[in-house]
Image (cartoon, rainbow, N blue to C red):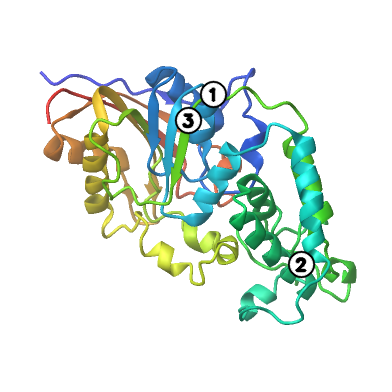
Amino acid sequence: MAKKIQIVIKQDNTETHDYLGYKLHQVAPYIGKMRPALARQLILNYSRQGDWVWDPFCGSGTVALECRLSCRNVIASDINPYACALTRAKLHAPKSKEICLSKLEATAQILKNLPDEERDEVPLWVKAFFHERTLKETRILISHFIRRRQYFELGCLLGILHHQRPGFLSYPASHLVPYLRDQLYPPSEYPEAYDYRDPIPRLKAKIERMLNSPLPPRSSKFRVLCKSALEQYLPAGYVNAVITSPPYMDTLDYARDNRLRLWFLGVSDHKTIKNMEIGKASTFEEDMLAALQTIVWVIKPGGACVLVLGDLRRSSMTYDIPVMISCLVRDNIRELSLERQWVECVPDDRRARRNGRATQKETVMVFRRQNGR
């Protein structure tokens, strides 16, 4: 008789009262983020202190940061350069706010003598978001932070890149996905919203918000790799556990929705990233099978593979992603056995699209790596 797997549906009140997520999770926005409390629960339940944990779809770095806060070593990887930049920002957060602000004050000096001409052509769609001087200074700061490997400052600057509030750098725009709101805030009625915005005081305020409380102790090791989960770039049996949330099939467009931040990171056409991502409905099963084969290769025998999977609903049909994954594992990967699964309801305020119906719940699937190759 087949072994029965426990399935439990958890409602929105699963967030613990004593842990609401560390401030660093708010460095910059990212669609479809895992809840920090859920990531922490999975890390504590399926790994031990000193273990190596791999998140091959690291996204905003939630699992990576929670691993560090829980004294786990972590490898975080993603094909999206913005995801990698955001993850590095969290993992490289400085211990001293004073030292960070002192370095920022020194960095401000490079903006005093700006070149008259742009070093290369800026697309019109990018120019539409910024005052000319703000755009020029922001580009210089981002290039400086990348060269100096000041990942935390880079992440904070990307976090204030666009919004309608005065503390951000763009003209009035949406926060999560870059769309101008010039009809809601026409220049004739809100001329101050289209004035020059100095990046330095806004970046300073952002850094102070992130570092206004002491950082918790962190003693673990970490690596961030801009790699696809389809590549076998880690040795066999390298990690004790995999904890990850694969892309929601054909639901979220991580490249398009982060296209402005990607442009500042050197990606001139976000579609080049889109074409490399897992998530297209036509190839999702094939890509996920390849990813699972890589994952099982990297996990030590006895280690856990934890997948957080979003459901997918369309007007005409619903895709049961957990069943799809179960079938892929059952038919192709004999080293993995399903140990447990449960459902987490996704409240409306956590969806990338307010009132969206595409993803309403997440299924957590826990597989165990058996002996043998």
Give the mark nearer the N terminus: 2 vs 1: 2
Which sits in the foreground, 141 or 163? 141
Q: Amino acid at mark 1?
A: Ser
Mark 3 Cα shell of 10 Å, populated few (<14), some (14-19), many (≥20) = some
Instruction: Determine which residue is flagged by label 3.
Output: 221
Q: CA distance from mark 2 to mark 1?
A: 41 Å
Q: CA distance from mark 2 to mark 3?
A: 40 Å
Which sits in the foreground, 144 or 47? 144
- Where disc 3 sits, the SS reads loop
Query: Does the image show residue 165?
Result: no
Residue 361 bears which disc, if any?
none
Query: Does the image show residue 255?
Result: yes
298 versus 135 height, above or below: above
- Where disc 2 sits, the SS reads loop
Of the two numbered discs 2 and 1 in the rendering, the one whose residue sits closer to the viewer: 1
Instruction: Determine which residue is flagged by label 1.
Output: 219
How far across and down, in percent of the image, does residue 36 sit?
55, 31
280 versus 232 height, above or below: below
Q: Amino acid at mark 3?
A: Lys
Residue 171 bears which disc, if any?
2
The structure residue drawn at horizontal position 80% and vertical position 44%, both measured from the top left corner, is 102
**Quadrant location of the N terminus?**
top left
Give the mark nearer the N terminus: 2 vs 3: 2
Which sits in the foreground, 118 or 323? 118
Q: Amino acid at mark 2?
A: Tyr
How far across and down, in percent of the image, does residue 211 sit?
74, 35
Rendering quarter of residue 179: bottom right
How far across and down, in percent of the image, does residue 48 sit?
41, 17
The structure residue drawn at horizontal position 81% and vertical position 73%, both measured from the top left corner, is 186
Mark 2 Cα shell of 10 Å, populated few (<14), some (14-19), many (≥20) = many
